[in-house]
Image (cartoon, grey):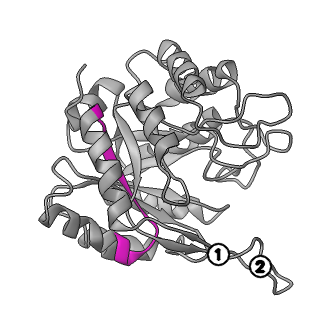
Amino acid sequence: MTANKAIVTCALTGVLTNPTHFPVPVTPEEMARSAREAFDAGAAIMHVHFRDQRPGMGMLPTWDADVAAEISQAIREACPGVVLNLTTGVVGDDISGPTACLERVRPEMAALNAGSLNYLRAKSDGTWAWPPMLFDNPVSKIERFVKVMRECGVLPECECFDSGIVRSVDLFRQVGLLRPPIDVSLIMGVQSGMPCKPQWLPLLVDELPAGASWQVIAIGRDEVWPVHRRAAELGGNLRTGLEDTFYLPNGERARSNGELIEALVATARECGREIASPADARAHFGFEA
């Protein structure tokens, strides 16, 4: 793969988005169909969350390994050669659900939340949007996740919500917790994390381990698209999907993951970037073809 090609990820559904209000896929059939649309539009990687499959419960996440296996298989069959990236984000010390899914599915990649964050959002009336919570990811928890990922042959995707977490990734490398290839996601737009501002990107990229791959997870509305453009200009990989935004560059509501990926691919090409195929992505990260 030439260095100029951008690897595109689609974040299909997210954690709690209500499928009765937004066009997020839930069932294996919906997930496979949405993944195929994104795949055809240029996504080589699918970032996957799993939802409760009981009637009327699709707004809730699940760590049922049977559900994870069924959905993952459906996506793999719909998108030959696609790279799977599973979520592992969980509050608290019990990581048995995410690790059971990793062991069952054996994805190529998985999110590794690389540090803790006070996960906050304030409403316009001066109250909390939800009770303040700590998304706790101490080093001891990260170490347990990395151990399982290594046993399963899974590449960690280091998710970083603030600049200190970004800098921690190289510390993990220095002590041998992480080994090359190192992949980092800069999460921008969480109200208590890094803002979704393109001028932050050069400074953040400068703090990454030498040779690390990186992408932006841009959360928000119209502010996400200038950040995607700057990431493309700086040589980063790219991600979008209904987990991250519901809005296209023109401000219209996206009807599907495919529409968002089409817009992201167009942005990359306007910046002179070509789009990596699944085979390109596999070669870049050293996955089996």
- Answer whether residue 73 is visible to the viewer in this image: yes
Of callouts 1 and 2, the N-terminal one: 1
Q: Nearer the viewer, residue 154 or 145?
A: 145
Q: What secondary structure is found at the residue carrying circle 1?
A: loop
Which residue is disc 1 drawn over?
A: 120
- In the rendered view, tell whether residue 282 sits above or below residue 194: above
Magenta region, residue range: 152-165
Q: Amino acid at mark 2?
A: Trp
Q: Nearer the viewer, residue 71 or 187?
A: 71
Position of residue 28 measured from the top left corner of the image (x, y, whole percent): 65, 21
Left or right: 46 in relation to 190: left
Tell me the tag on residue 128: 2
Proximity of marks 1 and 2: CB atoms separated by less than 8 Å: yes
Q: 71 or 201, which is in the foreground?
A: 71
Q: Residue at x 61, y 35 (%)?
A: 50
The verdict on residue 287 being magenta is no
Residue 64 rendering spot, x and y as whole percentages: 59, 31
**Left or right, residue 219 beside residue 39:** right
